[in-house]
Image: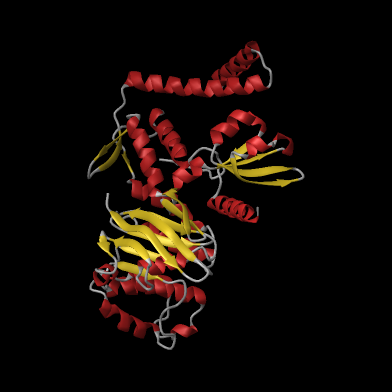
Amino acid sequence: MKIILSNSSDKPIYEQIVEQIRSQILYGELSEGTQLPSIRKLAQELRISVITTKRAYEELEREKLIETVAGKGSFVASQNKELMREKKLAEIENKLSEAIKDSKLLNMTLDDLIEILRFLYEEDKHE
Amino acid sequence: MNNILEVQNINKSYKDFSLKNVSFELKEGYIMGFIGPNGAGKTTVIKLIMNLIKKDSGSIKVFGKDHIKNEKEIKDRIGFVYDDNCYYEEFKLYEIKRIIAPFYSKWNDDLFNKYIRQFELPLDKKLKKLSKGMKMKFSIAMALSHDPDLIIMDEPTAGLDPVFRAELLELLLELMQNENKSIFFSSHITSDLDKIADYITFIYDGEILFSRTKDEISESYGIVKGANELLNEEIKKSFIHCTQSPYGFEALTMDIPKIRQEFGDSVIIERPSLQDIMVHMHMARRQAGNE
């Protein structure tokens, strides 16, 4: 598991943790059944408050990405394939929305944007 | 969850200073940072908790019990670090240990020796021969060697170099792996220790301005920066305090949504550090006092 926290980001720390663990689960870097460190261990290692790590785990539990078994710890939950695809799609949509927002600030048209997207997509294929 | 420390409506008056209805609580398993400028009342509150001075009114409970009626039992479970040395300076370290240890039912010599080795403390030296940092290390070793459930520290990092501050931080984080331990510490510089605090209680001029989780604090306050032209009387009302230079303004707000709505992307909104909040609140109070 990799977690890199930025103090200068305007995203709250717990959100940074949630995002990074979420994406590692969705992209299979953390596989089903993997045990996560306890909230106290994680707080110790990241040198942050226990409340922050607790909140991050609660959010991941709400999203059904991890499961906590009392007395045993937290584990990466088994993921429904269909649901995984949906979550990944949602992530892609989010990222594209951000790109759209930025492109509007530069007064770019939809066609301009599609052009860039096509270029990048094709380029990736050649690699 | 149990409250390990419960301070309710404490009042204490001196000639030129008073604590006014001080209340806060700390839950078992968490760390609270008690911050405020010099002279705000931090040490007075800690001395009241430790029953070193008498309160005028209010109640204090430690481990759910009245701190005076059950003083002996409570203190057996507290590790207390004073802001300056409280031991007799002419004694050698091992002599001090020999005097203090029997007072604690759970004193653990192995634990003590572990800390002595870890902090590289010379047991056969007189306390007065030690540097300020070494004295603090010794106080901490003494405070932790009876495996306390609640650790109370008054300005533990004042005058310590960053290396030892980091060391102390590691040590406390290690202790907190046990979820029955709690820590309450005061500091006037918002230091590295604040990073690991779960709760922050801010005292100013004898009053508690807030006592909340650190996440709530960093999410509800924002530092707004932008051009001077944007300012008007109306918008200043949503600022707690605002400073201006010829090049722009910087303000503390608790109303981030309103600022976003009003200014959109024409201002920068940053997460404030505790120090930012402390300084802006101090200046706001001082300004209010002058008007």
Say which residue appears at 33% left-offset and 58% top-offset: B5
Task: Determine if residue A31 is in view.
Answer: no
| Image quadrant in which you'd find residue B177 | bottom left
Residue B63 placed where, x, y %? Answer: 27, 60
| Image quadrant in which you'd find residue B21 | bottom left
Q: Quick one: which residue is furthest to the top in this view? A: A111
Residue B126 placed where, x, y %? Answer: 44, 86
Q: Quick one: which residue is furthest to the right in this view? A: B246
Image height check: is B151 above or below A123? Answer: below
Nearer the observer, B154 or B10: B10
Nearer the observer, B129 or B153: B153
Say which residue appears at 72% left-offset and 37% top-offset: B227
Task: Determine if residue B235 is in view.
Answer: yes
Image height check: is B8 above or below B113? Answer: above
Tell how many labels: 0
| Image quadrant in which you'd find residue A78 | top left
Residue A100 placed where, x, y %? Answer: 59, 19
